[in-house]
Amino acid sequence: MTYQSRAQWQLRLILLPSAALLLALVIWPALYAVWLSFTNAALVGPGAANPRFVGLRNYARLVGDGDFWNSLMVTGLFVLGSAIIGQFVLGLVSAVLLNRPLRFRAVFNAIILLPNAVPEVVAGFLWISMLAGGERGVLSRIVMGLGLQPQDWLNTFPLTMIIVVNTWRGIATAMILLTAGLSSVPKEVHEAAVMDGAKPGQIFRMITLPLILPTIFLYMLISTVSTISIFGFVYALTRGGPGGATEILGIYLYNQSFTAYQLGYGAAVAVVSLVFSLIVGVIYVRALKVEV
Amino acid sequence: MAKRPQLMAYATLSLISAYCALPFFWAALASFDGNASLFLKWPEDWTTANYTRIFTVENGLTWFMNSLIVVGAATVLTMVLGGLGGYALSRSNAWWKRPFLYTILLIRVVPPPALIVPLYKVLLTANRAVQEVLRAVLPPDMLRPAMRVFGLVDGYLGMILILTALQLPLALWILKTFFDTVSRDYDEAALLDGASLMQRIRLVLLPLALPGLAAAGLFAFISAWGDFLMPLIFISSPELQMLPLGLFRAFLRVNTVDWGFLTALAVLYMVPSVVAFGFARGFLVRTFGGGVKG
């Protein structure tokens, strides 16, 4: 055996622990979910002892389940409101403004990054105070300053509020990625446009925006995928309520499996969200043109 | 001349910053307030009693130590496995390299909530096997303490492995791309000098890989430290409780919500991840795409 082929074998050996761990704790459970979704497995009752094969029954039930469609709808609006609109718009504004020479740039930058570092449950906890009902809550005091009525925010506008919180958490991600995109726009193009007498708004629309479009697309994919995975802070804040108004997919999955004890049905929901995420993932991998 | 665009820029940035910073003000002020409440106010009774209460009256120390043990071990394990695996993926020219890398990228988009049901069933079965083995080799009174360490459900080992598995794809990816930038000449030279695999890793690659390992470790730490779902599902014993659940359960005690204690705990909980995030900032852009260049 030559030393080179021995070295290649050693490479396999040192990759093995990682491969085994991912196989055991991610890939095997994902495949197992597919099998579970065709059974009546449950945490309690007859399905717990001897799960039976029930064919597509869980999926049929899924299609007819209003709560599932509600959860999809809520998740869609949540992704649209926070990842696609909120984080993106505020992240783009921050990136553009911080891309020019300003005083206190580092301070603004640090403050905007801060929410990104907060553990999920702390994020939920902090906003319980901000969104507290009555006249003494922070948001209520702010809107009263604008001449509006105070509200019991988490009960009156639950979905809007979790969008506000998620936007808060994610401005940093958008800002970082878009700053990277902006810095790749060549200075000469910008200068040439100024020479030709273009206004700042025109330059942004006609030059900057088209040039950072690939970055924007990349950001949309990443944030969509990561927003679908959210569980912690929404659970801490509302646990999906009131009345399912904030029951995003992660919470619906948890509720179906661990409070309704229906593992088979929960697995069917899991498979549907796995398939959806994988589709977005494949688009992402293709869009990146990853060189491996 | 005061430029209007300049002023607009400051005004806009100040508004965004206020949105970002306001929640922290409440936590920071209330944690030093002897009469803390749910509402933002300036403390009249400054005190550090809220912080000392975490360690004296409540189980704060237990939660903190558990989080530190589990997340610390998961971070180290992620760095070791990610370093070895990332090196292998960078240097290998086997046919499975490409499928393996695509699989890693796709694993990163899998939502963890979709995995909890099958993962729970898989680990419950494996946990019974672990229990049988331990029962066979240990005296009966040692079984429970041993299960707390080696248990896959409601035990340190299970939690460490789960958190490692979730952080590993990103770590492998970061380190693979990192090793791609390290010239192969180093390992070829060491190989020709007759260095064994362990010697090559220890003497040649480890010193070269330190920045990559640091980035992978920081991201693994931040993400595992903040995770709420996995401790919620897989830890039930009070003596194994970690910070996220300690905080969560404490604010569910509706009748006796102690805002001073809770905010102090929240501040204590977020400090390590904020510090780690400060160090990780410089690495942030490169990791997103796995290939976004510039």
Image (cartoon, rainbow, N blue to C red):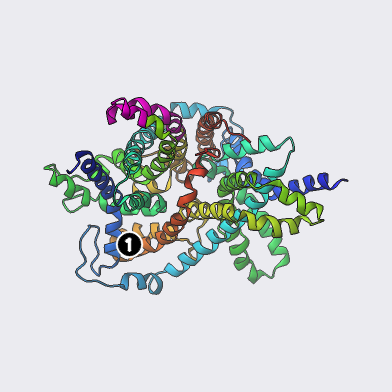
Q: Is residue B68 left or right of residue B200?
A: left
What secondary structure do most residues of the magenta stretch adopt? helix
Secondary element type, mark 1: helix
Name the residue nearer the viewer: B79 or A274: B79
Which residue is most to the left? Answer: A147
Residue A109: x and y, percent?
35, 49
Q: Is residue B56 left or right of residue B131?
A: left
The residue sitting at 69% across, 38% down in the picture is B97
The residue sitting at 43% across, 69% down in the picture is B59
Amino acid tagged 1: Thr
Residue range highlighted in magenta: A191-220
Residue B263: x and y, percent?
32, 62
The residue sitting at 33% across, 27% down in the picture is A205
Which residue carries the number 1 mark? B263
Residue B285 visible in the current orientation: yes
Name the residue nearer the viewer: A14 or B265: A14
